[in-house]
Image (tube, grey):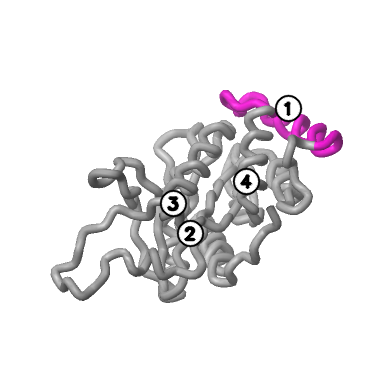
Amino acid sequence: MAARPLPVSLRAALDEAGRQLGDSFHRLGWLNGEVDAPMPEQHTVLHLASALRAQGFAVAPEVFLRGKEGASRRRVDLLAHRPGEVFVFEVKTFGGWHFDALEEDVDRLLQFGGVGPQTTPFTDMTRAHRAFWEDAVERWGCVVIQSFRTPRFPEAWAQLDAEAGPQDGLDGDARQAWKEVLRDNRRRVGSTTLEALESLLRKLHTCGATFGTQQVSEEILVDTGALHLLWAAFPLLLQE
């Protein structure tokens, strides 16, 4: 599937969130209770919300998907809306690389695109409580990864392209490059495999995802690499 153009406002929010995250991280350091633990994902969620609010978006965290009878109990990290646009985010923090868990986030966003958020009617019955969702012309899901891992990871991620991507798996050169990335990080890979990565990438390319990376900070802490944000954004289709 050819990628649709990424909304300018979404790209601007991702860039600004990275800038703000880098500023906070540089000024405060990592206020971390454990020496060897990944940065909590709320760091990025907070700065995404701030960047979106600056563009006039309304934001809501931990939004429930609509179920057949009430909320489904499944949630997304952040929803943002302004007239004509709705963006929904899932954020992951990578110590170990769990690509299967990231694929579950993509599935959750796709499900959200089909059913929308759980809402409660307004007391003003003339006000449609789902209009903000159903009237949106641009409706996008976005997975965002914050990572201190080897710089080869963002370098390889930046090479991904929706129009020439792994519809049936990684080609020879890309497969070898990702093998080297995982080998660089073998102590922190967790349960992930190259096959799990390929499954994730196939799904993202099928969705027509656009990929991006941003270096957020230099190496400013002991035993910690540069901080990067990586993301993949894709249109969500209303299925009702």
- Give the structural element (helix, strand or loop) at label 4: helix
**Hey, which quadrant is residue 212 in on the image?**
bottom right
Which residue is denoted by mark 4 in the rendering?
204
Q: Mark on residue 5?
A: none
- Identified at 47% across, 53% down, the residue is 89
Range of magenta residues = 171-194
Check disc 1: other Cα within 10 Å, few if <14, some if 14-19, many if 20+: few
Q: Mark on residue 114?
A: 3
Residue 81 place in picture, x, y as percent: 40, 67
* Image quadrant in which the C terminus is located: bottom left
Q: Nearer the viewer, mark 2 or mark 1?
A: 1
User: How far apart, in angstroms, are the residues tagged by discs 4 and 3?
Assistant: 16 Å
Residue 74 place in picture, x, y as percent: 35, 42
Check disc 4: other Cα within 10 Å, few if <14, some if 14-19, many if 20+: many
User: First in sequence: mark 2 or mark 3?
Assistant: 2
Q: Is residue 52 left or right of residue 178?
A: left
User: How far apart, in angstroms, are the residues tagged by discs 2 and 1?
Assistant: 31 Å
Q: Nearer the viewer, mark 2 or mark 3?
A: 3
User: First in sequence: mark 4 or mark 3?
Assistant: 3
Q: Mark on residue 24?
A: 2
- Identified at 66% across, 54% down, the residue is 211
- Give the structural element (helix, strand or loop) at label 2: helix
Residue at the front extreme?
240
Which residue is denoted by mark 1 in the rendering?
183
User: How far apart, in angstroms, are the residues tagged by discs 2 and 4?
Assistant: 31 Å
| In magenta stretch: residue 83 | no
Identify residue type, mark 3.
Answer: Gly
